[in-house]
Image (cartoon, rainbow, N blue to C red):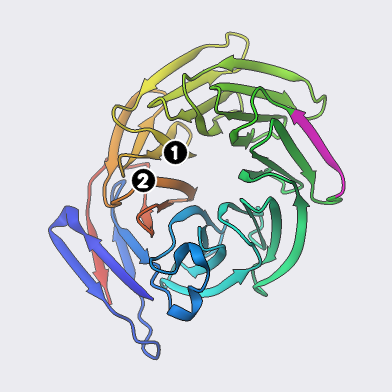
């Protein structure tokens, strides 16, 4: 594996090749929103690339997740493999095999001990992170799964894909699955509210539907976009929902009594992912190869992150770290500091 540290914004490009017997470490000093982009180039040995989808190229990245409270990251894509990385060293520590098709989504449990993955083979697999082994299939269906979401207390897992059903799996008893019916049979977005009262889903027809998990009733439903919704997230106090769409907009929807909504324009970007990065801060990524930071309360874009050379498919955030995966076959790690102005500066020490 190669780790490339690219500082294009600072006029400095440096590549370090690591010999297997000579590991190195990075120390980062930072001030501001965007201070460092670490690119994990997934350069695989030929014997690890036997599967047909990626025999002549590196795998595209369609799923990323940061370990809550830890120093690990998982990535997955069209080579059917889940990879575990050490964020401190940039090294791949394990690869987890078992899926038979493109992996579209990965999530950590909130304690960081387990990873759940799913994709085109219709299987949700559970992995023990510390032992790096499979704990089996916890849920399966006869259609591709596009997105997973895990509840804040990690008791439930929601899955959506090429069906009009939202599957809510009780992880304490995986045979217990609650099903909600959405408005279309091509769902790409799913999310729990922070207080675990609500579950929201959306897809091709632009509608966003919100259910009360306990009563299983629809509490809100609205046509928010003119094209496919690719991702959504709750922010703040569980009453504000942000959805991102191929129609080049973010839709901000207050689910409270006033039910206010507003549309934020993304210009040339068809959005593919949106992630909460703070109380009023979200990151949105998509087809223009950038990641944009938006202050939702002020309804303005406050910074733009450059570096990817292909559509950015996936985002995850924990504390001051944002990770992004792309069709350019790379994963980038960004340091964010929401308490300071967006000043770009970085120092690399080997």
**Residue 22 in picture, x, y percent from top left:** 36, 88
Is label 2 in a helix, a strand or a loop?
A: loop
- Magenta-drawn segment: 175-180
Q: Which secondary structure dominates the residues rendered in magenta?
A: strand
Q: Residue shown at 52%/56% (left/top)?
A: 66
Query: Residue beneath label 1, please?
Result: 272
* Residue closest to the eye, 251 or 230: 230
Quadrant of the image for the C terminus?
A: bottom left
* Residue closest to the eye, 149 or 9: 149
Q: Is residue 31 left or right of residue 113?
A: left
**Residue 172 in picture, x, y percent from top left:** 84, 51
Query: Residue beneath label 2, please?
Result: 311
235 is higher (above) or lower (below) than 105 = above
Q: Residue shown at 43%/57% (left/top)?
A: 60
Q: Residue shown at 75%/66% (left/top)?
A: 135
Label 1–label 2 contact, CB within 8 A: yes
Q: Is residue 199 left or right of residue 80?
A: right
């Amino acid at each position: 594996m190669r780790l490339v540290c690219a500082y294009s914004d600072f006029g400095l490009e440096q590549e370090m090749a690591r010999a297997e017997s000579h590991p190195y470490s990075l120390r980062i000093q930072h001030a501001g929103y965007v201070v460092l982009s670490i690119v994990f180039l997934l350069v695989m040995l030929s014997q690890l690339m036997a599967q047909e989808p990626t025999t002549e190229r590196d795998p595209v990245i369609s799923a990323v997740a940061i370990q809550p409270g830890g120093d690990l990251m998982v990535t997955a894509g069209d080579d059917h493999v889940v990879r575990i990385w050490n964020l401190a060293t940039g090294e791949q520590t394990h690869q987890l095999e078992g899926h038979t098709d493109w992996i579209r989504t990965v999530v950590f449990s909130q304690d960081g001990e387990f990873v759940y993955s799913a994709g085109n083979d219709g299987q949700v697999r559970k992995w023990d992170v510390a032992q790096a082994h499979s704990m089996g299939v916890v849920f399966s269906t006869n259609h591709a799964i596009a997105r997973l979401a895990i509840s804040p207390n990690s008791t439930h897992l929601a899955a959506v894909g090429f069906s009009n059903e939202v599957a809510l799996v009780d992880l304490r008893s995986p045979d217990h699955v609650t099903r909600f019916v959405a408005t279309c049979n091509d769902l790409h977005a799913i999310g729990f509210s922070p207080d675990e009262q609500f579950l929201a889903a959306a897809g091709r027809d632009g509608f966003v539907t919100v259910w009360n998990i306990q009563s299983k009733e629809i509490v809100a439903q609205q046509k928010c976009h003119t094209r496919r919704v690719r991702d959504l997230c709750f922010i703040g106090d569980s009453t504000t929902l942000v959805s991102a769409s191929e129609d080049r907009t973010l839709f901000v929807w207050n689910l409270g009594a006033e039910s206010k909504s507003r549309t934020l324009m993304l210009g040339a970007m068809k959005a593919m992912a949106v992630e909460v990065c703070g109380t009023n801060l979200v990151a949105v990524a998509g087809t223009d190869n950038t990641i944009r930071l938006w202050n939702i309360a002020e309804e303005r874009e406050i910074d733009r992150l450059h570096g990817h050379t292909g559509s950015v498919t996936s985002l995850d955030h924990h504390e001051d770290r944002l990770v992004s995966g792309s069709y350019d076959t790379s994963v980038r790690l960004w340091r964010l500091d929401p308490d300071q102005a967006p000043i770009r500066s970085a120092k690399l020490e080997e």
